[in-house]
Amino acid sequence: MTEDSGQPHARLVGVNRRDFMKFCTALAAGMALPATMAPRIAQAITDPQRPPVIWLHGAECTGCSMSLLRAEHPTVEKLIFDLISLDFHETLEAGAGHQAEASLARTIESNYGKFILIIEGAVPLQDSGIYCRVGGKNFVDSVKETAAAAGAVIAVGSCASWGGVAAMSPNPTGCVGVQEVLPGRQVVNVPGCPPNPYNLLSTIIHYLTFGKLPALDAKNRPKFAYGRLIHEHCERRPHFDNGRFAREFGDEGHRLGYCLYYLGCKGPVTYANCSTAQFGDAGSGCWPVGTGHPCFGCTEQGVGFNMPQFSTSPVLHATPNAGHAPITVERGEGVTPGAAALMAGVGGAAIGAGVVFASKLGNKEERHEDEKA
Amino acid sequence: MSDAKPLGGRILTPTFLVCLLVIGVAGYYTYKRFLLGIGAVANLNDGFPWGLWISYDVVVGSAFACGGYVMALMVYVFNGGRFHPLVRPALLASMFGYSLAGVSVLVDIGRYFNVYNLYLPWQINLHSVMLEVALCITTYVFVMWLEFAPAFVEKWKLKKFGAVLDKVVFVLIALGVLLPTMHQSSLGTMMLMAGYKLSPLWHTSTLPLLFLFTALFMGFAMVIFEGTLSGRVYRLEDETHLLAKIGKIIAYLIGVYLILRLQNIFVRGAMPEAFSGSFLGYMFLLENALLLGGMFILAYPGYRHSPRLLFIAAVLVLCGGALFRFNTYIIGYNPGTGWKYFPSIGEQMITYGLIALEIAGYMLFVKFFPVFSAGHKSAAPIPVKE
């Protein structure tokens, strides 16, 4: 395949074809799709007609955008801006003021009903939503208008998913998640504070590739990322199963890397792939529990920002996963008194019966009548 | 065949009730096994995946059930027509023995619900001895029920079915001789794979032949054992003259077998192990002493014509043959450091239950269906408890 063989982004700087295909394969693996899907993904995200992404900000800290910008495997910001076709992003937009708003309106108009709307941040509703205004418009109204024209709506981060830090009690601005503002609309939640950028990226690319959203759980989170409890695959799980716990920060157990359950880890009630996918590209072991801090449950509604950080969580699955091999091998049970007695008893009875029977048998053959002849 | 008739008589004899009791207890353990799994009732483990159920119910049990095989061989292949009255009772016992061996395999297999894969040609592994054994035994079970079917035909007067059966029964009989020859030797082949885990006293490439021989003389010994037992219990005409002739065959078979067995041990240099004073050495000596004892009694016409000595010899042969098979499958088998096995109570009870089921089924069938040809004796009954 030559450089200008119709590949719209073959000229892309900093991403060669090999890295790009590796990225597509990694995404396919992350979503538990077969590797044969990688070319389809590559085709979808290089299609010049692919739907663009519009990214709006509400009541939040821009941490989700920041974490996305820090992903670099390979240089995801290039992929985002050149491949995902991020046509509008308020904080990254080169233009400002009315110029930016005009760009947004133009993008919505030209991609009506097709674009992917990503919302970062909670939506304040108190006092008609005046606590978050962009371009003279209340954010809640922007969300409603833009969502009406969008092909799919994704709420990125815990704030957009269900309020997050912005909605913490006493919640003076009346912040809620995007879903509450758009009751009739399916909103995919990619919670986390911030969420793993690859979870968001995979969700977008799934939509681009297959034209539909990935399978979702009851809280509208993609199952490929939020299907299992952190506790189920935690690297410190063997310590939990064997009762080795850190009891306070800096104690012997904490330094030895024991389970953080008693320090308030919310892994046992939090559905997310942090324990297997780790976080972004920060490196191996770089996720809260890996660095020695208990999980605070950011991806779980009613846990993160709701349950106190250092109080213990209920354990949903108290028994260890049946899948792991036992440490000691049962080598069978030898003879027990009962089993030996039973066998001896039956054997003895059989021998006794045989002896009695044999003793009653005659010694002489009774001649058959036709034998006598 | 038509001279056979049902014995009739009381069903609920004390023996029958005892059998029912044992079956009931075994039923409880079987229910537990299917509800909670094998581990809940058996001591089977990764070191000893084959325990009492395979070694007794299948390996020893099927040899005990070789009566039908050897009698068919005698009567139809070697044209020994005079033994004909012994065929149907032997076949009945074999039928129960083999059918229940199949049942015990179902209990023993962890994923019994996958067993149908055995019969799907595209799932078959043609290099597996176990496949040969499994297919052969299941086929043989069907063949035996069909071989025995003339008894049903006579009982229920199924004329049409009887006519069809008459035309094909020779094929069934041929299969009934061929199939056990195949799988009884294959049972020996199976333990070849145990390699060094099996004591050199039993691990030899001759195992298939040894298993075939034990199947033959244990089958004959079982005919004597059952014939004597049912003759007394049901007060049938004395058949000692026929049984003694079978005893003579057994003596020759064991003679050849022992030469093979001992020569094999000598040639492989394993004889010192037999006399080393080890537990396995004693088991080897005991096994062969039992067979030698049986052969000794049966070798002399004066002894083998005594019903008592004939019966004792048959029991010795059965015990010796069974011990050979137990030794090969469990006792002489050592899977490595630390592995232990002794059949648990539940495991034993399921096996006893299957034996009780065989006895009860046999007792029921001889009363309902034409099995025995010999008439009732008019003489005073010999006081043998039933």
Image (cartoon, coloured by chain):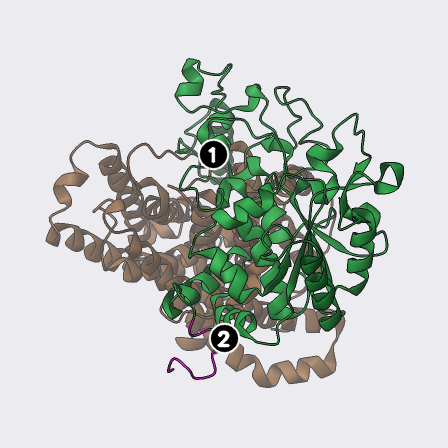
Chain colours: A green, B brown
Name the subunit of mark 2: B
Inspect the image, locate mark 2, and give the three-letter code of the amino acid beneath it: Pro
Q: Where's the C terminus of chain B, which quadrant?
A: top right
Q: Same chain, marks 2 and 1? A: no
Q: Residues within 10 Å of mark 1 (few under 14, many from 20)?
A: few
Nearer to us: label 2 or label 1: 2
Query: Disc 2 and disc 1: Cα gap in Å?
Result: 43 Å
Is residue B179 depicted above or below B47 in this figure?
below
Question: Can you tell which mark lies on residue A347?
Answer: 1
Give the structural element (helix, strand or loop) at label 2.
helix
Left or right: B84 as drawn, with respect to A60: left
Is residue A295 depicted above or below B59 in this figure?
above
Q: Using the image as rendered, state which of residue A98 and residue A263 is in the foreground.
A: A98
Q: Where's the N terminus of chain B, which quadrant?
A: bottom right
| Residue A4 part of the magenta-drawn span | yes
Residue A7's x, y, as percent?
Answer: 47, 78
Which of the 4 quarters of the picture holds residue B211? Answer: bottom left
Residue B112's x, y, as percent?
Answer: 57, 55
Q: Can residue B372 be seen in this view?
A: no
Residue bounds of the magenta highlight? A1-11
Q: Using the image as rendered, state which of residue B94 and residue B114 is in the foreground.
A: B114
Left or right: A5 as drawn, with respect to B346: left
| Residue B62 part of the magenta-drawn span | no
Name the subunit of mark 1: A
Inspect the image, locate mark 1, and give the three-letter code of the amino acid beneath it: Gly
Question: Can you tell which mark lies on residue B364?
Answer: none
Which of the 4 quarters of the picture holds residue B99? Answer: bottom right
Q: How many labels does the image show?
A: 2
Left or right: B35 as drawn, with respect to B176: right
Question: Can you tell which mark lies on residue B121?
Answer: 2
Tell me which secondary structure the magenta stretch mostly adopts: loop
Residue A276's x, y, as percent?
Answer: 49, 44
